[in-house]
Image: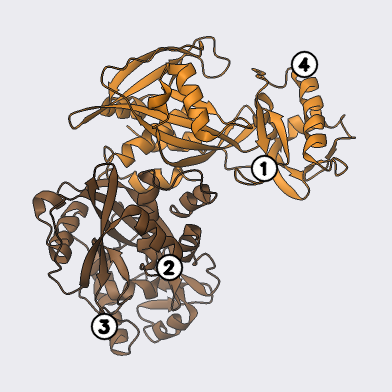
Chain colours: A brown, B orange
């Protein structure tokens, strides 16, 4: 078994040599694969595709003009099949999560631009004496991404204009019918971050992690069709599945491992203990 | 207030340009300052001090011969005043914590050789309803290092031949008279790591962190003279002192911040939230 393999799978995007920095006003906000940069070339009034970078045109001087330009380009490229699962859900693009963003971009386009994305993951757990159990979801078979894989009970990307805890409460209601009185008490317990590469996209992701204690008699029900079902598993079983299989969506495996460390289920007797935790904070 | 400043103080050792790699069999095990390398030059049967590295002589081919050679050199240099607080406590030196070490080195010499050191820190806390309080120690005024500063209730370096939890139990007894039944239940909750520079020494440290819940009526007493006293403080007060002062020993501040994050006291509303956590895992 190797939990470290799961962490390495999250951080498989360290080699950026096939990518060009995506620049806005001399600040890198993403990574664009050479293939995708050719798709941006025709939009030369909005992008300067150069040998060593892709730059958003300087005449796009404010949030609104940049957002409109990006919207126009991404809609056109979506029709050409460059993105999958258009959601009409705007993500903020900028220097960092806490900085004023430069513009908004449709969520489905974010990976192609290699833009930092943020999300929330909620570990829904139940205490049975000294034992911990976790509610685990399974993604619907018709999800555009990672169909059928194991997932957290509640997880979601972080769109513009919603607070983190608001997002937790909204996703908890939609994905697992968790009452807001319970979801609102979800406890922030840290962030994990990684740089993942998939299908010529770099994904520098940051996940805000929450622990949500659930009453023993609570049973989640999905209400938005995104999850096919749930099961309540002892945390050691979650560890076993995470270590021995790739059944969990890649980043849910990392969230599982972080949970196991914080709750002392995975301890320093494991020779991967130190490297795992460095890998959770790239 | 800035908790991030405390993290930055831990990680002030990123510039290694004044240091030479300390090599054993082509593997770097430490960083040696140019000043200290001149002190090693006379021992040219044991060290090859070159322009770009300091190498342990290749004829020292095993654990025992390396340990004896290092012991001889460090005792001589200790008489010359290169180290402070000789303890006769051997630390393992090697590729990593979980790898077979190359040799042992007296603890007091470790910082001068820039060798990775490991330790345990134990957060002794008390629950009062939903509130958490922490027992905080103050270092004795005659400690050779960081006298009079605030410290964790239990903390110690990790010597050769002792398990991590054994070390926790031993230090908990010596530093705070915590019964082994309580200390033995201290929960491993992760590692933090940083690279600190102080007095021309690089310190790449890794701390194994434990949370130890204490009964409300427990009062710690120091039995080894290393701590001058203890106080029980609400965690928010610990946060305030950590953010607003440098009263805590630099790495205890990092352990405090990690505790605050894991227990949801410091949440993602703080704009330093993400950067703090990256800084705790260098």
Which class describes the residues within 10 Å of circle 3: few (<14), some (14-19), or many (20+)? some
- Residue designated by label 4: B79
- Label 4 sits on a secondary structure element that is helix
- Residue designated by label 2: A245
Residues under labels 4 and 3: Cα distance?
74 Å
Q: In which quarter of the image is the N terminus of chain B?
A: top left
Residues under labels 2 and 3: Cα distance?
37 Å
- Residue designated by label 3: A75
The circle drawn on residue B17 is 1
Residues under labels 1 and 3: Cα distance?
49 Å
Residue B2 location in percent, x, y? 35, 34
Q: Could you confirm whether marks 4 and 3 are on the same chain? A: no
Lower sequence index among marks 2 and 3: 3
Check contact, mark 4 vs mark 3: CB within 8 A: no
Dot 3: chain letter: A
- Label 3 sits on a secondary structure element that is helix
Which residue is found at the position 37% from the left and 70% from the top? Answer: A247
Residues under labels 1 and 4: Cα distance?
28 Å
Dot 2: chain letter: A
- Label 1 sits on a secondary structure element that is loop
Residues under labels 1 and 2: Cα distance?
44 Å
From this view, report whether residue A211 is shown above or below residue A118.
above
The circle drawn on residue A193 is none
Q: Could you confirm whether marks 1 and 3 are on the same chain? A: no
Which residue is found at the position 39% from the left and 87% from the top? Answer: A42
């Amino acid at each position: 078994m190797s939990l470290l393999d799961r962490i390495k799978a999250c951080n498989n995007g360290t080699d950026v040599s096939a990518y060009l920095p995506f620049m806005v006003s001399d600040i890198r906000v993403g990574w664009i694969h050479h293939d995708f940069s050719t798709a941006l070339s025709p939009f030369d009034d909005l992008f300067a595709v150069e040998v060593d970078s892709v730059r958003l045109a300087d005449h796009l001087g404010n949030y609104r003009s940049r957002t409109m330009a990006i919207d126009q380009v991404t809609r056109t490229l979506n029709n050409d099949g460059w993105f999958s699962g258009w959601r009409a859900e705007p993500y903020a693009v900028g220097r960092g999560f806490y900085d004023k963003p430069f513009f908004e971009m449709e969520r489905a386009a974010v990976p192609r631009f290699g833009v930092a994305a943020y999300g929330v993951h909620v570990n829904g757990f139940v205490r049975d004496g000294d034992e911990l159990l976790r509610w685990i979801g399974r993604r619907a078979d018709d999800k555009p991404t990672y169909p059928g894989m194991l997932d957290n009970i509640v997880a979601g990307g972080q769109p513009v204009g919603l607070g983190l805890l608001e997002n937790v409460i909204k996703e908890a209601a939609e994905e697992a019918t968790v009452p807001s009185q319970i979801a609102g008490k979800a406890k922030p317990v840290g962030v994990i971050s990684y740089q993942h590469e998939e299908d010529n996209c770099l994904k520098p992701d940051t996940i805000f992690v929450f622990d949500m204690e659930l009453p023993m008699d609570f049973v989640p029900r999905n209400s938005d069709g995104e999850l096919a079902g749930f099961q309540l598993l002892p945390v050691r079983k979650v560890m076993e599945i995470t270590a021995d299989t790739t059944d969990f969506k890649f980043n849910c495996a990392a969230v599982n491992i972080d949970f196991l460390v914080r709750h002392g289920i995975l301890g320093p007797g494991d020779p991967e203990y130190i490297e795992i935790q460095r890998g959770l904070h790239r």
